[in-house]
Amino acid sequence: MGRTTYLELFRAGDVPGREAALGSAGVGLSVESAGELAAVAGRLPELGVPTPVERRHPRDFGDGVLIPWFRAVYTTQIYDAFRVWGMEYEQSYFADPRSGSGPEAHPGDVGRERYLDSYRRSPHLLDFTGVRVAVTADDLAGSVPLLRAGGYTVREGPGGVVAEGGGAVLRFDAVPRAAAGLRQVDMALVEPMPLAHSEEIGNSTLTVGPGPRAVWTFAANA
């Protein structure tokens, strides 16, 4: 958990549906103020998405009572292994004392920093600053309109896309479905490290330092 960003990792089969398959991934982009998601969705038709898919997601705190959690907008319901979605946390979620969220930083605050107040954060990690994901060409084409609608600066190249915004750099490489998956995560640290130190974790390598940064790289699917 960072200050305004977080990363979730699952083993193949840990979650239901197509997300359970090896190489599946996704990026959720949340707005900071109530009502901003509607503006993002409203920009999608002019970006080639005439009918955005909108959903409301509930949450159960363990007592069997569902409460509104967040609203989401997608460009499509059809994808291979990756998609980007826009999201806006519900104001009623923050109002529920079980959420453990912090106070408003400004009127209508539904932002990530307020939401993440309810989670224990790493004393060493400041935030995630970048990610690189290998995705199919179809999934990439379905993701670009939402990135643009969300205010990201998108640069398209022959092998993929780079999107910058919200203090992060998102890199997407176009690959066949069998090669899809997470490739790299960039992190900003609370304190700089004097030297670089690397650890092998399964088929990945985490390098911390030098300086206030860390990079976690993942091998391509075999």
Image (cartoon, rainbow, N blue to C red):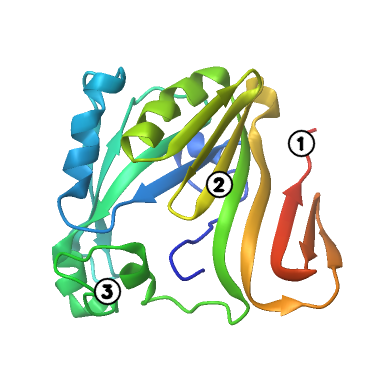
* Mark 3 lies on residue: 99
Res. 176 image quadrant: top right
Comparing 216 with 81, the one in front is 216
Residue 27 x %, y %:
46, 44
Q: Which of the marked residues, 2 or 3, is nearer the chain's N terminus?
A: 3
Q: Amino acid at mark 3?
A: Ser
Q: Is residue 5 above or below residue 81?
A: below
**Mark 2 burial class by Cα count in 10 Å: few <14, some 14-19, many 20+:** some
Comparing 138 with 60, the one in front is 138
Q: Is residue 90 above or below residue 133?
A: below
* Mark 1 lies on residue: 220
Q: Amino acid at mark 2?
A: Val
Q: Amino acid at mark 1?
A: Ala
Q: Is residue 200 left or right of residue 13?
A: right
Q: Residue at x 41, y 47 (%)?
A: 28
Total numbered labels placed on residues in the image = 3
**Mark 3 burial class by Cα count in 10 Å: few <14, some 14-19, many 20+:** some
**Mark 1 burial class by Cα count in 10 Å: few <14, some 14-19, many 20+:** some
Residue 39 x %, y %:
18, 40
Q: Secondary structure at mark 3?
A: helix
* Mark 2 lies on residue: 169
Q: Secondary structure at mark 1?
A: loop
Is residue 165 visible in the rendered image? The answer is yes
In the rendered structure, are the residues bearing label 1 and label 3 in contact, judged by CB atoms less than 8 Å apart?
A: no
